[in-house]
Image (cartoon, helix red, strand yellow):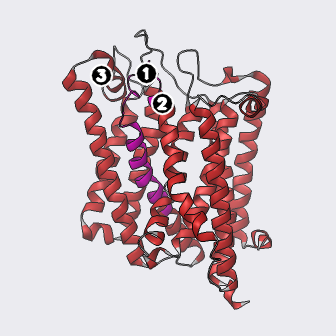
Amino acid sequence: MLEKILQGDRRYWMWVAFLLAVIGVGFACYVYQCFTGLGITGMNRDVSWGLYIAQFTLLVGIAASGLMVVIPKLLHHYKKFIDLVMFGEFMAISAVIMCLLFVIVDVGQPMRLFNMILHPTPHSMLFYDMIVLNGYLLINIIVGYNTMLADWKGVPPPRWIIPVAYLGVPWAVAIHTVTAFLYCGLPGRHLWLSALMAPRFLAGAFCSGPALLLLILFIVERVTGYRPADEEAYQTLAKIILYAAVINMFFTFCEFFTAFYSNIPAEKHGLLYMFFGLEGYHRLVPFMRTSIFCGFLGIFILLVPPFRRNRILLGIACFAIFLWMWLEKGFGLVIGGFVPDPFGKITQYAPTLPECGIAIGIWAIGALVLTFLFKMAIYAKRDGQRM
């Protein structure tokens, strides 16, 4: 079925050409970074994780969110999600590939990656993050490909794939839990030093990932005319997004309550810098306030059944939820954890143009991979049984 990615109409090839052009710009920026060093980014001694790791953190959650269509199908035998499983698996594959690429560009010289393999440090969370991410990628490739192959042949998936799919359930939780441990295991960063970090990461993943999946499926339906699932499946997924979004908003409130009710300055400084400004520094304030507004907007639309059943409003809600998580976890949370530093010094961070070019290029790679995978999946489901 690989030959199907080489078949398409004019719109398809224009989209592929656009993504390849963006990837080319991103690759040129990366080559520039390789020769010049990470000094071309906005990162510095005090803010050593920037846009790259922020996007990595967000995308780990997008990858883990495939669980939200797998669990209802596997554990609760919800047949309405049977056609969404493969699309969720393929979105997870694309997200994990982008995760790995963001790690590669963040370490500087790519040869440094071999240090993790040649000189492993089992006491480091990064070591386990490498294991769970690559393992999750392999699980999704196995399950997604064999499910697609079975659809193409018009037969049930092989029985041996069921335990592999079940293995993906705890593995999906593990990839985002280990990522959260990378943050909350750092005692000098008070914004991250919270037992809620892993549950908060998972709640954010389980609303942002399905929201992105719904948006992509709406686009697929509009462009190709193929409807991956019926309206009941979409509404059920929208309710899952709502529950996860409410839980995530509650966790955010808990962080504010703990910091401000305890009145411990170190606990408050990160949140103050992000949402209200601190000592005249307020670079993140517009973004973080926008994120909270988007979160409440998305929850409100999903909470009202007539609004949720309206396709346009549902799309707006999903976009608002995803933007909320992109601003909060894909940018603010990572940067806010470094400001102020353990000595109380404030060093602001802003991504540079080459840094943004590399990040956009990686997102374009993910979009290209997803385009190819979804094209094969749609062919397998719509046209495969006619062969």
Q: CA distance from mark 1 to mark 3?
A: 12 Å
Name the N-terminal-most of marks 2 and 1: 2
**Residue 385 screen position, x and y as percent:** 67, 88
* Residue under pointer 3: 268
Does the segment drawn in magenta span residue 209? yes
Please, is residue 83 above or below residue 302 in the view?
below
Q: Amino acid at mark 1?
A: Arg
Quarter of the rendering containing residue 6: bottom right
Residue span colored magenta? 184-213
Q: For the residues carrying marks 1 and 3, which lies nearer the camera in this image? A: 1
Mark 2: secondary structure: helix
**Residue 58 screen position, x and y as percent:** 51, 43
Please, is residue 190 above or below residue 207 in the view?
above
**Residue 23 screen position, x and y as percent:** 72, 47
Q: For the residues carrying marks 3 and 2, which lies nearer the camera in this image? A: 2
Name the disc covering residue 189, or none: 1
Name the disc covering residue 183, or none: 2
